[in-house]
Amino acid sequence: MNEMHSVILIAVMAIVTLLLRALPFIVFGGGRPTPACITYLSSVLPYAIMGMLVVYCLKDVRITTAPHGLPELIAGGTVVGLHIWKKNTLLSIVTGTVVYMLLVQLIFA
């Protein structure tokens, strides 16, 4: 790839990102009420996406071979426990990720 190709790729990605971010304001702007289906989706999609991410992260865990899913179980428990305690999503996810990485790199390596 030459430099011009890279510049064009970055420009296209920036324009598409800008348009995707502006699209809801363009479609639902002007003081019109937001349709009920969009309001419903905005309330259920975050939970659906989190559930999908959990399934995706755990799909390759093999409980029949060592370490039998222990790093995933411990890190997941850390995320759930910390979120119940502190109610801070970012803190829970970051801490769970750090715990998982420490477990698989140092303890269960």
Image (cartoon, rainbow, N blue to C red):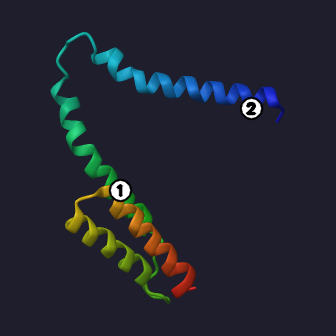
Q: Is residue 87 positioned above or below 107 on the image?
A: above
Which x, y percent locates residue 59?
43, 68
Quadrant containing the C terminus is bottom right
Which residue corresponds to the image point at 72% horizontal and 27% vertical from the top-left? 7
Q: Is residue 74 positioned above or below 16 on the image?
A: below
Whether residue 99 can be seen here: yes
Q: CA distance from mark 1 to mark 2?
A: 33 Å
Quadrant containing the N terminus is top right
Whether residue 69 can be seen here: no
Identify the residue under disc 1: 90
Q: Nearer the viewer, mark 1 or mark 2?
A: 1
Which residue corresponds to the image point at 18% horizontal and 23% vertical from the top-left? 35
Give the residue type that dot 1 points to. Leu
View extreme (right): residue: 2
Identify the residue under disc 2: 6
Local packing at callout 1 (Cα closer than 10 Å; few below 14, some 14-19, many 20+) is few
Query: In the rendered image, which quarter is residue 79 located in?
Result: bottom left
Element assignment for label 1 = helix
Give the residue type that dot 2 points to. Ser
Which x, y percent locates residue 91?
35, 61
Which residue corresponds to the image point at 74% horizontal and 32% vertical from the top-left? 6
